[in-house]
Amino acid sequence: MDIGELSRVAHAMTAKGRGILAADESSGTIKKRFDAIGVVSTEDSRRDYRELLFRSAEGMKHISGVILYDETIRQKAKDGTPLVHLIEAAGAIPGIKVDEGAKPLAFCPGETVTEGLDGLRDRLIEYHGLGARFAKWRAVIDIAPGIPTYTSIVTNAHALARYAALCQEQNIVPIVEPEVLMDGDHDIDACARVTEWTLKEVFQALSHQRVTLEGMVLKPNMVISGAKCPKQASVDEVVARTVEILKRCVPAAVPGIAFLSGGQSDIDATTHLNAMNAKFDLPWPLTFSYGRALQAAPQKAWSGKPENVPAAQTAFTHRAKMNGLAATGTWKSDLEKAA
Ligand code: 13P
């Protein structure tokens, strides 16, 4: 393990004003996104779509790293250039999703554990050879009556920590992503309680597995009301509660924190990130690692038509720029109206 190199990459991933594009939708998830815009999901259509993002020169200025899916890290652009080279040429770092999804957890009805540890060392060696310098593993914690259980939180934390140790052993920076879902009707207090519990167990497990905190990036959810909660917390409340929980749980040695968007609207995801950076002086940079909140607009603008590529690139560039500003606390809502 080269901790100097891991730390350099982790800092570059969370460098001021830039954030991560999560373009690592599995074939099943990207099919759902394409169904919504009336596009048939094929190897070529997935390639064409992702190529247009990576070729958005202006938008990519705000992107520090791109999370890819197994198919994409091996794909070539239409002109034969590997997609990984397009990302590097744009000044961003290629990364790879290595988990194999959330599967039902035995004896815990309604809960899951993320799988993918078997054979992971060999896959990491191959991905490093293909250009990946960081990886992602997403654990999913749901909130519902009687859920989450201790079993699910500890089991997911253990898997995350084993993944992170294997990544560092192979000189790949682990993005550690314990996502407390915002589905459901729970209030912000429930989200705060479960997020705090989860992060504490995750950092305990990372310590047990001898993970070096200086060589990782944390990808948490924001502390937010459930999407179906009748009383939605204000922006001030979301940012205060999120910062409070992060301060309690995340050691200052962690180089950076990059939030997931988790189903927030594009504007909410930007507003919350901006308010945290504008209001608080924190031990870590706070940035974005958004999937939906960066891609919903370009997907809609593209709709699978080659003639719409420039419009889709404009839409992507706009969201990347807005979130880049939010990562420095300098975004203003009238910039959205102007666009
Ligand atoms: P969302 O921003 O759409 O939540 O996706 C981020 C991600 O990578 C989830 O694993």
Image: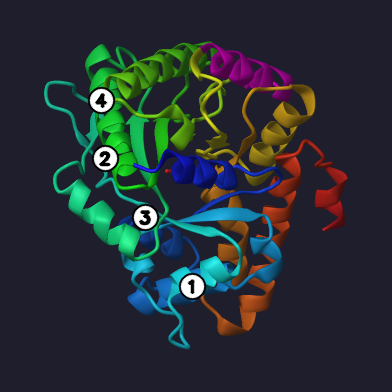
Asked whether, in this view, residue 114 is left or right of residue 284, the answer is left
Tell me the SS state at disc 2: helix
Q: Indicate yes or no: mark 2 CB to ligand 1 under 8 Å.
A: no
User: Can you tell which of label 4 and label 3 is closer to the viewer?
Assistant: 4
Mark 4, residues whose alpha carbon is within 10 Å: few (<14), some, or many (≥20)?
Answer: many
From the image, give the main secondary structure of the stretch colored magenta: helix
In this figure, which residue is indicated by the disc labeled 3?
29
Tag on residue 158?
4
Tell me the SS state at disc 1: helix
Measure the alpha-carbon separation of dots 2 and 1. Answer: 25 Å
Read off the magenta span: 232-248
Nearer to us in this view, 305 or 112 = 112
Type of amino acid at the residue the image marks with label 3: Thr
Res. 304 visible in picture = yes
Q: Earlier in the sequence, mark 4 or mark 2?
A: 4
Asked whether, in this view, residue 320 is left or right of residue 139, the answer is right
In this figure, which residue is indicated by the disc labeled 2?
166
Q: Is residue 263 above or below residue 158?
A: below
Tell me the SS state at disc 3: helix
Task: Write the residue at 33% across / 14% down.
Answer: 145
Tell me the SS state at disc 4: helix
Q: Earlier in the sequence, mark 4 or mark 1?
A: 1
Q: Earlier in the sequence, mark 2 or mark 3?
A: 3
In this figure, which residue is indicated by the disc labeled 1?
85
Type of amino acid at the residue the image marks with label 2: Leu
State if disc 3 and disc 4 touch (CB < 8 Å): no
Residue 294 in percent (x, y) is at 59, 53
User: Can you tell which of label 4 and label 1 is closer to the viewer?
Assistant: 1
Asked whether, in this view, residue 251 is left or right of residue 279, the answer is left
User: Can you tell which of label 2 and label 3 is closer to the viewer?
Assistant: 2
Which image quadrant is residue 330 in? top right
Measure the alpha-carbon separation of dots 4 and 3. Answer: 25 Å
